[in-house]
């Protein structure tokens, strides 16, 4: 048995003023060199648990605390947050607020400087090298991209060379390739530098690929701590808590006969490939020619055009007074009734494209037409009844003090006679009746999204633009979002979503536009786009496990839903045994 | 009116942000920008206070010449010079108009010119120093002159957070505009439109403050986990932090040059107090 590096013994904590404890009798033991994922639904106490590690609880949040915490063999009792922080680096979910200095090198060496290390700059440099940021050392924080900021927050936590790293949702805002990059760095820190790593993670596919153990939290209690395969194979239990194991695991679980319930399930596409096989009679049932016909049918239905973009260019001025091109000659035609997914890596120009349609920015060259109006230079007020733009960060949309007033703002400003009815209708459609009088800023992430969509839908716009509607949501809230987006269909003619979330794309979109370096590099239906693995990789996107596995197994089509997939495959007769450890 | 509209169109929040940050941080490339912050602060202390007590126009004019020189040396953004000139001219303008009412004439301009001269010396000195000192070095300079840690840190953090705040302000303003209704007619001299914009600019501050308050929770926790309070008022930390500050030869040249110039100036001013007018 390896040395334990962190132990919690019967920890119970109640926030001041709260009646229910957020943590109840949690006992757990982290081993040196482990890579642990903490999972659980929203409000199950994951973040609170991690704050116990750093001593923020109970030193900073003075609630009701009982139990013992031992860090690196020493009791944490009586030690200050500053002392404990030498052993633990913490990266917050809203990591941007953790960067307190103006330049990269300043920020990364901030912690060692505070502890009075004369070699604070070298320590900072070392941490930058570990995260691959060395070239950016003199950049200003506000010039970094989201992914770089996250790496910097990680580097800042590494600068003190702590034994333990705690990262709250490392990949929530990143495109799949950047997300892999972060996890690859974490793996290297874990394997080569012997750091113990704790992540709070919703994406089971990352847990399957990178983590060694899983801790499941439920309503403030720790349910169990298991090796990763055993943990993710408990499909039924996880689904009941609203946690979704990897697609392959779920597919295998659906396919298996009840007799072998305790079996370990495959976690990755490769393992799935060894485990499953194309169903014998599947091909007859799903004749490819049938499927082609179905596809061509959707193409024939030409609808009225809603948005046209003619050779649109856009560039921004930078601090060095140079022009930075964001869009280079975009040609686009969006039609009525389409559900469009705009995909591409961070910085491909997705948000800029949407801002052009909403009239928020003006193209440097070319024209944008929405419903016959030329948008170039029209004030956003003029467009707002035609185009609704929902920001990535819902908080930036909240300008009133209750959900009801937020939704009514647009209608009241125009003194529409049916304001009351429309607000009531929206509250009902987006299930906000109980939250109507609350301040939207104080709602949970998923609820805030629903409010922001209701605000947009109340306008009854022709086009609705959504920027990353599923970022920062846990998977079950995300699943719910897909339904909410279906609600939207009945209020809006055309919906455009910019997203990294391929799951969402595959479940929701009817048309996919792929952007890369300010250009549209592909535009087509789901099946056309998803079949082209190279294209996806070039655009910085990853295939979902199901897509990958569909290809490996040679299915007649690339599956996007679990049901479809399960109907096409079966478990191999002679399954190669899967072992518990990986 | 059209010209004003076009000019207003060009001023965007993004533009202001770039200009502000450019002025604040793009300074280490100039001669003055490479000086030690303490040198600049001492120098500023003199030129911000002494002109108030000097009435000798020759001396003031000499100081003004020096300030123009340092301002040119520090390559200040033309926007800021423009704003300064606008301020000075409008000030002198309305005082002159006022003096006309009370029976003054052209001759009343001269004493006003003295005041303007003083104000310009002080303003130019401020512009020179603060555009040559980025917030970091300003904060470190103040720290080394004995200002409390927390104040020095808040100064540099204030600048760090400024672009974030501006961006968020911009977004919230957009939310108001995307959901609001601009007056359908501009009204006489655009008064309706102007009131509309003024109103949302003011309203946008409330959500901004609430969101900032929410965000600062993480910042405060993070400061704690990053050892901020551990390093606070710690002499060793302060020493390490400021160890890069060094009075170089150019600092001494600059200080002694300025001193000699000022002494000469007072001497000439004593001999020819009415050199100009």
Image: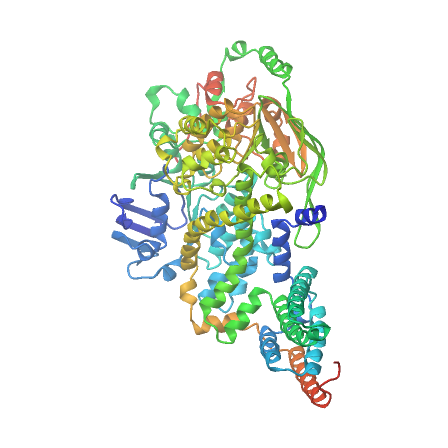
Locate residue B181, reporting x and y percent: 55, 37
Question: Would you say residue B11 is visible in this rendering?
Answer: yes
Residue at 36% x, 43% y is A46
Left or right of B88, for residue A32: left
Nearest the viewer among A285 and A490 is A490
On screen, residue A473 above or below A118: above
Q: Residue at x 37, y 19 (%)?
A: A257
- Say if residue A266 shows up in the picture: no
Image spot of residue A504 (x, y percent): 51, 29
Q: Quadrant of residue A178?
A: top right
Q: Which colour scheme is used?
A: rainbow
Image quadrant containing the C terminus of chain A: top left
Left or right side of B71 for A115: left
Q: Nearer the viewer, residue B215 or A80?
A: B215
Q: Residue furthest top?
A: A284
Who's the residue at 42% across and 24% down the image?
A: A252
On screen, residue B243 versus residue A258, left or right, reads right
Q: How far from the left and from the top, in percent, is residue A356? A: 64, 36
Quick one: B207 or B190, which is closer to the camera? B190
Question: Percent position (x, y) of residue A464?
Answer: 55, 30
Residue A260 shown left or right of residue A301 in the figure = left
From this view, report whether residue A502 is shown above or below residue A196: above
Disc count in the image? Answer: 0
């Amino acid at each position: 048995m390896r040395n334990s590096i962190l132990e919690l013994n019967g920890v119970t904590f109640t926030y001041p003023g709260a009646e229910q404890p957020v943590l109840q009798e949690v006992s757990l033991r982290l081993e040196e060199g482990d890579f642990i994922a903490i999972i659980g639904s929203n409000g199950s106490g994951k973040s609170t648990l991690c704050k116990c590690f750093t001593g923020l609880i109970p030193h900073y949040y003075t609630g009701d605390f009982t139990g013992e915490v031992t860090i690196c063999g020493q009791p944490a009792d009586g030690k200050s947050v500053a002392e404990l922080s030498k052993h633990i680096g913490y990266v917050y979910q809203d990591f941007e607020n953790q960067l307190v200095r103006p330049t990269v090198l300043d920020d990364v060496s901030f912690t060692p400087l505070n502890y009075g290390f004369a070699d604070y700059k070298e320590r900072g440099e070392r941490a930058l090298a570990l995260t691959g940021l060395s070239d950016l050392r003199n950049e200003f924080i506000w010039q970094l991209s989201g992914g770089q900021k996250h790496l910097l927050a990680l580097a800042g936590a590494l600068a003190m060379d702590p034994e333990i790293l705690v990262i709250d949702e490392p990949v929530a805002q990143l495109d799949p390739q950047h997300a892999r990059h972060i996890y690859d760095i974490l793996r290297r820190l874990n394997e080569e530098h012997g750091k113990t790593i704790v992540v709070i993670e919703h994406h089971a596919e990352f847990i399957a690929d990178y983590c060694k153990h899983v801790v499941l939290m439920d309503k403030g209690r720790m349910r169990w701590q298991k090796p990763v395969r055993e943990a993710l194979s408990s499909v039924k239990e996880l689904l009941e808590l609203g946690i979704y194991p990897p697609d392959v695991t779920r597919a295998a679980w659906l396919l298996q006969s009840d007799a072998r319930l305790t079996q370990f399930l495959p976690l990755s596409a490769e393992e799935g490939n060894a485990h499953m096989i194309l169903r014998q009679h599947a091909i007859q049932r799903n004749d490819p020619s049938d499927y082609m016909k179905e596809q061509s049918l959707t193409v024939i239905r030409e609808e009225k055009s809603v948005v046209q973009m003619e050779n649109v260019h856009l560039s921004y001025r930078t601090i060095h007074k140079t022009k930075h091109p964001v869009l280079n000659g975009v040609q686009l035609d969006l039609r009525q009734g389409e559900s469009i997914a705009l995909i591409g890596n961070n910085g491909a120009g997705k948000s800029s494209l949407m801002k052009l349609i909403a009239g928020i920015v003006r193209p440097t060259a070319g024209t944008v037409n929405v419903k016959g109006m030329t948008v170039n230079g029209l004030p956003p007020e003029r467009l707002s009844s035609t185009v609704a733009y929902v920001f990535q960060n819902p908080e930036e949309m909240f300008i009133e003090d209750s959900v009801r007033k937020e939704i009514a703002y647009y209608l009241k400003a125009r003194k529409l006679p049916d304001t009351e009815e429309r607000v009531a209708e929206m509250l009902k459609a987006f299930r906000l009746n109980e939250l109507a009088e609350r301040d939207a800023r104080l709602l949970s992430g998923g609820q805030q999204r629903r409010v922001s969509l209701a605000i947009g839908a109340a306008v009854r716009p022709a086009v609705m633009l959504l920027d990353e509607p599923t970022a920062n949501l846990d998977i079950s809230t995300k699943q719910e979002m897909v339904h909410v987006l279906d609600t939207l269909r009945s209020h809006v003619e055309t919906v455009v979503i910019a997203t990294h979330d391929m799951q969402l794309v595959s479940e929701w979109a009817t048309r996919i536009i792929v952007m890369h370096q300010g250009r549209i590099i592909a535009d087509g239906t789901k099946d056309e786009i998803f079949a082209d693995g190279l294209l996806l990789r070039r655009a910085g996107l990853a295939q979902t496990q199901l897509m990958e596995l569909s290809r490996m197994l040679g299915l007649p089509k690339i599956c996007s839903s679990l049901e479809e997939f399960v109907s096409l495959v079966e478990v191999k007769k002679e399954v190669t045994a899967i072992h518990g450890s990986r | 009116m059209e010209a004003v509209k076009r000019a207003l169109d060009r001023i965007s929040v993004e533009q202001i942000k770039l200009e502000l940050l450019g002025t604040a941080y793009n300074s280490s490339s100039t001669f003055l920008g490479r000086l030690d912050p303490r040198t600049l602060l001492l120098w500023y202390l003199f030129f911000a206070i002494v002109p108030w007590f000097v009435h000798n126009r020759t001396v003031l004019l000499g100081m003004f010449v020096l300030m123009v020189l340092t301002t040119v040396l520090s390559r200040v953004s033309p926007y800021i010079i423009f704003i300064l000139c606008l301020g000075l001219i409008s000030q002198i303008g309305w005082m002159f108009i006022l003096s006309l009412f009370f029976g003054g004439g052209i001759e009343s301009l001269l004493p006003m010119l003295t005041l303007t001269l003083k104000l310009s010396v002080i303003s130019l000195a401020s512009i020179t120093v603060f555009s040559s000192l980025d917030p970091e070095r300003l904060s470190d300079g103040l720290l080394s002159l004995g200002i409390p840690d927390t104040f020095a840190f808040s100064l540099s953090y204030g600048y760090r957070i400024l672009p974030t705040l501006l961006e968020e302000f911009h977004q919230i303003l957009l939310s108001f505009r995307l959901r609001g209704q601009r007056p359908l007619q501009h009204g006489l001299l655009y008064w309706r439109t102007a009131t509309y914009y003024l109103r949302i600019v003011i309203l946008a501050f409330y959500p901004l403050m609430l969101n900032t308050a929410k965000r600062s929770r993480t910042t405060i926790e993070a400061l704690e986990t990053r050892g901020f309070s551990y390093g606070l008022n710690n002499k060793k930390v302060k020493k390490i932090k400021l160890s890069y500050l060094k009075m170089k030869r150019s600092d001494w040249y600059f200080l002694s040059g300025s001193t000699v110039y000022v002494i000469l100036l007072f001497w000439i001013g004593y001999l020819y107090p009415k050199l100009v007018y």
